[in-house]
Image: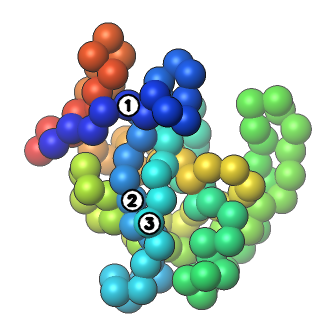
Amino acid sequence: MERAYDSTSYDPPAPVVDVFFSPPGDPLTRVWALALADTGADISVIGPGIASRLGLPLVGRTQVAGVNEETEIAPVWRVTVHTTLFGKFDIDAIELGGTSIIGRDILNLVSLHFDGPKTMLRASS
């Protein structure tokens, strides 16, 4: 399976994954998002409003730091992430403003090839 990098929203083009977020145990209630595949992110991020739209269970709060090293406290939600590229995962994700992100909590579980010159993200089974 493979997916072209997004050159419309990102300059330079960036690896993205089509995902559906759903509450644990309820795959029919879901929200689609285009998520950045970010090897620099420790934890996956759901975009703003997704937790409330899906009624996700809050499992805690955690301190996070972005690339600018400023810290903030973010809510942590239990969510099922369905990807068209590399499967389904039940994870704890944070909710922040901005884009959804697939972080290393998922990326480290799959075999991926980031082909920058061809602007393609490939998953192998």
Percent position (x, y) of residue 35? Answer: 48, 49
Where is the N terminus found, in terms of image quarters? top left
Residue for badge 2: 19
Which dot marks residue 50? none
Q: Of label 1 and label 2, which has the lower sequence position? A: 1
Which residue, as the protein is rendered here, is positioned at the far front?
A: 8
Residue for badge 3: 32
Measured along the vertical axis of the image, is residue 10 above or below residue 86? above
Q: Secondary structure at mark 3?
A: strand
Q: Residue at x 74, y 30 (%)?
A: 67
Residue 89 in sight in this render: no
Are discs 3 and 1 less than 8 Å apart at CB? no
Percent position (x, y) of residue 61? Answer: 76, 68
Callout 2 crowding tier (Cα within 10 Å): few <14, some 14–19, many ≥20: many
Residue for badge 1: 5
Specify the quadrant of the image occupied by residue 37. top left
Q: Nearer the viewer, mark 1 or mark 2?
A: 1
Count how many numbered circles sit on residues in the image. Answer: 3
Spatial CA distance of label 2 from label 3 is: 6 Å
Residue 8 lies left or right of residue 89; in this view the side is right
Are discs 2 and 3 less than 8 Å apart at CB? yes
Specify the quadrant of the image occupied by residue 9. top right
